[in-house]
Image (cartoon, rainbow, N blue to C red):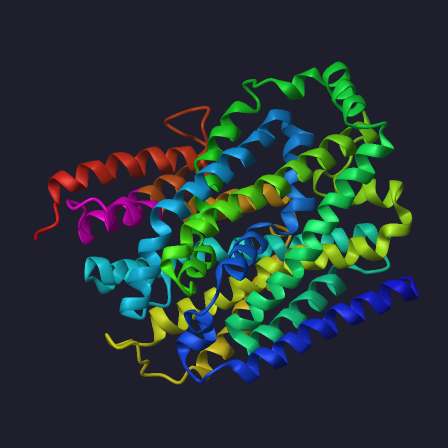
């Protein structure tokens, strides 16, 4: 590793530690302060943390791999942008308003409070953790894979994983939500600059955008049409990723941080524009990298890092720092939210005033536990496989939160009904994932879970309607 890279990494980590110290000085000793930054995040910072939390290590691993392996399968990302933005626009203001009024901290607590059911809260919390831990492990795996690739093996997989995890654990442990949001703003700037630069460099290296499009259309026409091979995963991913970028607990919790619920729709518009720019940049890099390698087979998760290493060798330092920023902007959010789920939903009994029975020091200890668990998964053979299936599984579980969310605006939805709906969807998902057999072949586990959940949700509103 060059001295320039060492200095850049040192400066980056020092900046994060500085943010943690600043955030700690601003933080009050309350759960809301630690997890929600006192509900005092403005439009720009909230937009930045939403985008930075959504744009993660997959931006240079699993997402470009969608085009490399499935061509038009990548178009699911544009569907995800529209669905996510629409959900923030539609539900965001009410979530922020009720969260402030009820001093709600987590997604599960929001649902539990609406349905007046501790069981709804506990089951939602369990599903939240089941959706976050695999996603967290996927981000950590992405860091290890990419750093090992772009450094030519000088940064071993294990070293990359542990370095990233240690830095995040430190600034989240001490700084809480304010440190996460501030670091997301910093990392969001780094991410945007990097993605724009990567797109321009790779496109230019292949002779320009028109030449890349020509090469794809002439040499890889199968990538531009839907087929029996890529249509089922496209539907699967649209019915999971599109909703998950709003329903993952760490994304949902961002809305509870808003200073003014009346500005949430401004956040939705800004986020939609930012997401669109990011997705277009990722698509450009994926197409150019695919053209660069042609018929040469390569690990899909290392497509873009390998192309950048070959075509932009002097940019190795920027690439490594940008990769860390991509991953850490999501990992820190997931770790913080996972800690809040464990402490708020499982271990403490918050009163209506929002005071907790247990000391919030437990929350910070639980954050270290969550990080250790994710690292252990990332180090397994299952964890180091191709990242996209791991994320799709995580997103499918997160999407089960759609039904209690819809129930907040559907007066017939009851606590019993949403629990049965989520159990039914989860059971269908596990069955298809384990056996590989879906009653809706060739659709996969995500689509099966969505269809089953939708049917059960409608049925339970008739059988177990909510009583006024």
Q: Is residue 86 left or right of residue 50?
A: left
Asked if residue 320 shows in the view, the reply is yes
Where is residue 127 shown, x and y percent of the image?
38, 55
Q: Main secondary structure of the magenta part?
A: helix
Please report the residue visible at 58 percent of the width from the left and 39 percent of the height from the top: 276
Picture layout, residue 1 above or below residue 228: below
Question: Which quarter of the image is occupied by the N terminus?
Answer: bottom right
Q: Is residue 296 left or right of residue 21?
A: right
Tally the marks: 0
Front residue of 258/215: it is 258
Residue 420 shown in magenta: yes
Residue that protrudes farthest toward the left in the picture: 468
Picture layout, residue 99 above or below residue 89: below
Where is residue 24 shown, x and y percent of the image?
56, 82
Please report the residue visible at 80 percent of the width from the left and 50 percent of the height from the top: 149
Please report the residue visible at 78 percent of the width from the left and 25 percent of the height from the top: 212
Where is residue 379 shown, x and y percent of the image?
65, 59
Picture layout, residue 334 above or below residue 36: above
Front residue of 332/214: it is 214
Quadrant housing residue 105: bottom left
Asked if residue 379 shows in the view, the reply is no
Q: Is residue 330 left or right of residue 149?
A: left
Where is residue 287 shown, x and y percent of the image?
73, 30
Q: Which range is magenta? A: 401-424
Residue 136 shown in magenta: no
């Amino acid at each position: 590793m060059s001295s320039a890279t060492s200095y850049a990494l040192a400066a980056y980590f020092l900046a994060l530690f500085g943010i943690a110290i600043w955030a700690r000085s601003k933080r009050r000793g309350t759960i809301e302060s630690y997890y929600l930054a006192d509900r005092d995040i403005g439009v720009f910072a909230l937009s930045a943390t939403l985008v930075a939390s959504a744009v993660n290590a997959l931006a240079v691993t699993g997402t470009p791999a969608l085009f490399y392996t499935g061509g038009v399968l990548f178009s699911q990302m544009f569907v995800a942008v529209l669905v996510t933005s629409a959900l923030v626009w539609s539900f965001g203001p009410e979530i922020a308003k009720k969260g402030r009024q009820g001093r709600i901290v987590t997604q599960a607590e929001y649902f539990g409070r609406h349905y007046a059911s501790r069981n709804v809260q506990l089951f939602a919390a369990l599903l939240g953790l089941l959706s976050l831990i695999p996603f967290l492990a996927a981000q950590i795996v992405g860091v290890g894979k990419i750093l090992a690739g772009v450094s030519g093996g000088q940064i071993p997989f294990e070293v990359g994983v542990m370095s990233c995890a240690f830095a995040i654990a430190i600034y989240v442990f001490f700084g809480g939500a304010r440190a996460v949001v501030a670091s997301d703003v910093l990392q969001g700037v780094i991410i945007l600059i990097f993605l724009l630069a990567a797109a321009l460099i790779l496109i230019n290296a292949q002779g320009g955008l028109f030449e890349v499009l020509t090469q794809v259309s002439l040499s890889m026409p199968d990538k531009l049409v839907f087929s029996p091979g890529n249509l089922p995963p496209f539907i699967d991913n649209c019915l999971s990723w599109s909703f998950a970028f709003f329903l993952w607990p760490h994304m949902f919790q961002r809305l509870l941080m808003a200073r003014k619920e009346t500005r949430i729709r401004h956040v939705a518009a800004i986020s939609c524009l930012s997401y669109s720019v990011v997705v277009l940049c990722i698509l450009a890099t994926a197409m150019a990298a695919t053209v660069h390698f042609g018929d040469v087979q390569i690990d899909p998760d290392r497509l873009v890092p390998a192309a950048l290493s070959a075509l932009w060798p002097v940019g190795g330092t920027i690439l490594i720092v940008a990769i860390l920023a991509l991953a850490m902007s999501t990992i820190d959010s997931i770790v913080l939210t996972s800690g809040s789920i464990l402490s708020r939903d499982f271990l403490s009994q918050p009163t209506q005033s929002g005071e907790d029975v247990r000391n919030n020091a437990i929350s910070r200890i639980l954050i270290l536990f969550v990080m250790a668990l994710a690292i252990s998964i990332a180090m397994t053979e299952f964890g180091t496989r191709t990242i996209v299936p791991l994320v799709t599984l995580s997103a499918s579980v997160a999407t089960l939160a759609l039904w209690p969310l819809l129930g907040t605006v559907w007066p017939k939805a009851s606590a019993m009904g949403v629990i049965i709906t989520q159990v039914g969807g989860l059971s269908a998902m596990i069955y298809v994932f384990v056996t590989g057999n879906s009653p809706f072949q060739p659709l996969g586990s995500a689509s099966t879970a969505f269809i089953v959940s939708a049917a059960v949700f409608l049925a339970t509103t008739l059988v177990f309607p909510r009583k006024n």
